[in-house]
Structures are given as C-alpha cells and as structure tokens.
Image: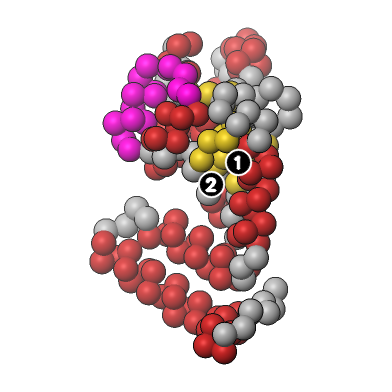
Amino acid sequence: MLAGAGQALSAGHDLKEMQAHRNDCDRGRDYYVELFARCAALMQAVVALPKPVIAAVEGIATAAGCQLVAACDLAVAGENARFGLSGVNYGLFCSTPLVAVGRAVPRKQAMEMALTGSLYSAQEAERFGLVNRVVPEGGALEEALALARTIASHSAPTLAIGKRAFYAQIERPLDEAYALASVAMIDNLAEPDSVEGLGAFLDKRRPVWGS
C-alpha cells in the first residue's frame, strides 16, 4: 500500500533543492545523475516487488508523484485528487515520469499530459486508465485496503508469478509474449498452491494456501 501523509500523495521532486544544486562546481550534474538514478531504481523496485502495490491517492500527484501512481499495479483515487505532468510549466519536460505514465495510459494521452502540464481530475485519470476507480473524498485508503484484502486472499506465490509474467510480456511482440506467459503458467502449475487450488475447486471446498 502506498499513500501520502497530509493533503497530497506527492508533488514530485523538491524543485528548491534541485535549483540550489546549480551552485555546485559542476552546476549540479552529479547530483542530478544520482537523483534520477535513485528515482528510476524506486520505480523499478515497485514493479519488481513480488506483492501487488496499490496507490491510495488523495490531493495531488504530479510529476514524479504521478509517475509513482503509474508505476503501482493498482490505484484508487479520492474524487478530488488531481494528476499531472507539470514539469513543462517550469522548463523541465517530464521525460522520466513518462516512462511509467506512457506504459499506464494511451500514448496520446500521456503526451498531452506532458506537453500541456495541465492538472487532470480523478475522473479523467480513471477514464485514461491511470487509476482503477474513484471514490468519495477521504475514502481512497479504505477502498485500497479493501482491494488489498481481496487480493491477499489468494495464493502469494501465484500472485508473484502472475505479476512478474505480466510485466515481462506486456511490451514484447505477441509471439514472445505468449511464450513468456506459457512458461509462467507451467511454472505456476508446479507450485503446491496450484495443486491445492485446483484440487479444492474440483472437490468443491475452499483452498488452504501454503503461504
């Protein structure tokens, strides 16, 4: 679960800090290299985590904050949440946020967000596919927790295999995608929880997961 403290999820990087590093002897280049490397590592870690990650968004999620929402597996937004790739407003195009956002929403919509720097409503974000659902203001965390409980009722190894396979195949050509997904299902069938789950279905009983 990923949620913000206070009135926003995240407005992205600290622009004051970024600007201050222009006074470094290298005009901040080393700092910027480290900053974006750490940011990229965080976003990739969210995807690589075996457990599903759900964002609960109230308030704003802009620039790297919007990137973080896009990197999560699922997202729930309060009705007053706002999303945007605002960097262009400050002369800094949101190139790294577009990596995640461009994989979560249609390309033309991702480019509109980045080119305009506008804020988009929770309802628009749901229409784009950036968030899964919109709930009354203040209810995002509760709804995200309910979603998490539903997901947690399933086999953890099965979820991990499925998440890993999804991200491995989603950008591949169709033949490669099916090959990767087939291997994932074969590996999944070898898991004890798959033996238990299929047996429970055939026996008409509830499965008892091993982990």
Residue named by callout 1: 55
Magenta extent: 106-121
Looking at the picture, tell me which residue is in the foreground, 107 or 23.
107
* Residue that appears at 53% across and 49% down: 73
Relative to 172, residue 144 above or below: above
Looking at the picture, tell me which residue is in the foreground, 95 or 182.
182
- Please give the label number shown on residue 74: 2
* Residue that appears at 56% across and 65% down: 159
> Residue 123: x and y, percent?
46, 30
Q: Residue furthest right?
A: 5
The quarter of the image holding the C terminus is bottom right
Name the main secondary structure of what is drawn in magenta. Answer: helix
Magenta segment includes 87: no
* Residue that appears at 67% across and 77% down: 209
Q: Are marks 1 and 2 in contact (CB under 8 Å)?
A: yes
**Looking at the picture, which amino acid does disc 1 mark?**
Ala
The secondary element bearing badge 2 is classed as strand
**Looking at the picture, which amino acid does disc 2 mark?**
Leu
* Residue that appears at 57% across and 85% down: 204
> Residue 65: x and y, percent?
57, 30
What is the CA distance from the residue labelled 1 to the residue labelled 2? 6 Å
Relative to 40, residue 115 above or below: above
